[in-house]
Image: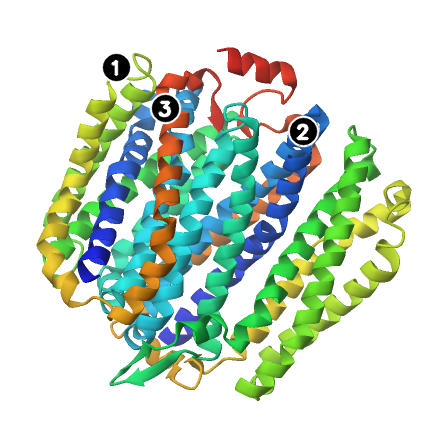
Amino acid sequence: MDVLDLARTQFAVTGSLHFLFVVLTLGLAPLVAIMHTRHAMTGKPAHERMTRFWGQIYVINYALGIVTGLVMEFQFGMSWSGLSHYAGDVFGAPLAIETLGAFFLESTFLGLWIFGWHRLPRWLHLACIWLVTLTAYASAFWIMVANSFLQNPAGAVERGDHLVLTDFGALVTNPMLTMALPHVLGAGLWTGGFVVMGASAYHLFRRTADRESFTGSLRLGVVAAFAGSLVTVGFGYAQFGPVSLFQPDKFNGTPLAGIGLGFMILIGQLLQVLIMFVLLPTVYWLPRWRWAHPILMLITPLPFLAAIFGWLAREVGRQPWLVHGRLTVADAMSPGLTKGMITLSFVGFVGVLGLLAVVDYLLIVRTVRRGPAAVTLGADGPADSTERAHALSL
Amino acid sequence: MDILWTGVFALLLIGYFALEGSGIGVGMLLPALGGTQPDRDRVVAAMAPFVLANEVWLVAVAGVLFGVFPSIEGEVLSGLYPLVVTLLVSWILRDAGLWFRRRLDGHAWRAGWDWMICLGSYGLALSWGMALVAMAGGLSGSPIGLPGLGGGLVVAAAFAFHGWTFLSWRLPGQVTGASRAGGALLASAGVAALPVAVLLAALAPWLLEHIAPSGTLNVLSVMILPFAPLMLGAQVWVWRTFGPRRAADRVPSFF
């Protein structure tokens, strides 16, 4: 592989890893917020246990979302400085808005939520997780604005040797964005729903404690996955319109883009039929059908796979362009980048992040298996009401 | 508008050093101050509630660098290439240590991640010091060298001092054996941020020269400034909630 291939592979691997964790973050955030709302309204210890249990899974998953995102953010300048030179005045704006107006708040409020257990007033603590959800969605919006600009450079004109932002409205209403954003958010909800469904199925199958809670969460997972799948599939097909307009050869140019699209549709369509015609109509009885639970566990990873295939189709189908029709990937590569440099960072980033990703998934599986009783999110110790009284009295 | 956004960039970078400098310093001191596992747990529990709110300042720095100084962004990050790699890998290891250390119960597991926190914190401090020296030298020549190493040691010492003061403020009379008031913590934050503040003052004309056009800056102002009170308010809320007055250290919290 030459320098360009290595730099591209590095970005593709960190980007794929990033999205594997982000897609679950996007989907789990609203579900944890819903559970926390139920806990805040009823005050039932069982609801607190479940909120902390799913919140703990959310938090373990979030760790890898952060570190892979960091590497992506810095990689733009390290490997692709041609992009910031040519299109930075336009492409940089949504990225800056995302970090300041969305992620900055998301991270701060997540810290308050994690460590605020048994410390913050009930409704303010609840507000934190809803703000985390809201800002996570805002993050997704701005990142998709930036990505859609690469697919179709709307709102900008070329002046001299670089692009200038002339129409911010056009940038945020890019036709390559409007159909793709709900598609991505729907995929997140679908993935989150499947994880909640699969983990609940595990506990019901093993006949562990908290049977009632996991019955409820399995149903919540199926309903969330149903809503997510409708949005994802609907806005998936809706994208063929803008794609045929702006990138007519997107899925014919390289075999990988076509393969990605094909497998994504295959997985998505099969799962959607299963959810709509089997899981949703039987959702009342499903928690009692022990024979069905291993199947639910087995299909849990499929939305992750479909999400990666989807991004392969969108991004590989953009090649050889970085900014479609304007700047090629090869021209955007940093001028001084040598094979030694990219090899060093490739080993550092891809090696470390890949290893941590495996560890992270093993930890999530282990947290799921140990169940709500073992969760120590935020404050240590059992999550019961006596503990709270104890903590507040100190 | 140019001065406003240069100021925002400077505020974010100085804020990162002043705030996260304490977390990095605590990480460096972790083996020295935490002889036993319960000691290290207490040290980590003291800093953990602040980490997410602190490190996000650097994420914001990178975002503003891209949005406000696009022509500088590529030059700086590719000019400092090996240092950016060590900085990011150190950051990743430090964060992984914080997030993972309590996920398994084994002694070796937790002690191992504690070493990762320490190693990552040293890596962060040294990389930053070397990066500041390389920036001061105008990115000419190799970013790694003897003067850079000297800069790294200075930043590491400043962070260690800031971390030590933070622990004396957060857990008075416990881990460090000393007690420090909020004023002393502010002063040590000033020490931690001084190197980068000096550098930014020297680089200000160069930054202003390379700022994005007014069309881009206007968009950023309209989209970001309305959120500024919420951003600052949330940060203040973190420090009020998890400060020593709430006696919260009696209920240690972790990721």
Disc 3, SS? loop
Residue occupied by mark 3:
B243
> Toward the viewer: B79 or A66?
A66
In 3D space, how far apart are the residues under numbered discs 1 and 3 (Cα atoms)?
14 Å
Mark 1 vs mark 2: tell me if same chain: no
Callout 3 crowding tier (Cα within 10 Å): few <14, some 14–19, many ≥20: some
Looking at the rendered structure, the number of numbered marks drawn on it comes to 3
Residue A378, image x, y percentages: 52, 29
Q: Residues within 10 Å of mark 2 (few under 14, many from 20)?
A: many
Chain identifier of the residue bearing label 1 in the image: B
**Amino acid at the residue labelled 2:** Arg
Q: Quadrant of residue B126?
A: top left
Asked if residue A314 can be seen in this view, the reply is: yes
> Callout 3, which amino acid?
Gly
Q: Is residue A248 above or below residue A268?
A: below
Q: What residue sits right under mark 2 in the picture?
A: A49
Q: Earlier in the sequence, mark 1 or mark 3?
A: 1
Residue at left offset 62%, top offset 47%: A30
Please, is residue A74 above or below residue B155 in the view? Answer: below
- Spatial CA distance of label 3 from label 2 is 27 Å
Q: What type is the residue that disc 1 sits on?
A: Ser
Residue under label 1? B179
Residue B212 percent across, percent down from the top left:
24, 68
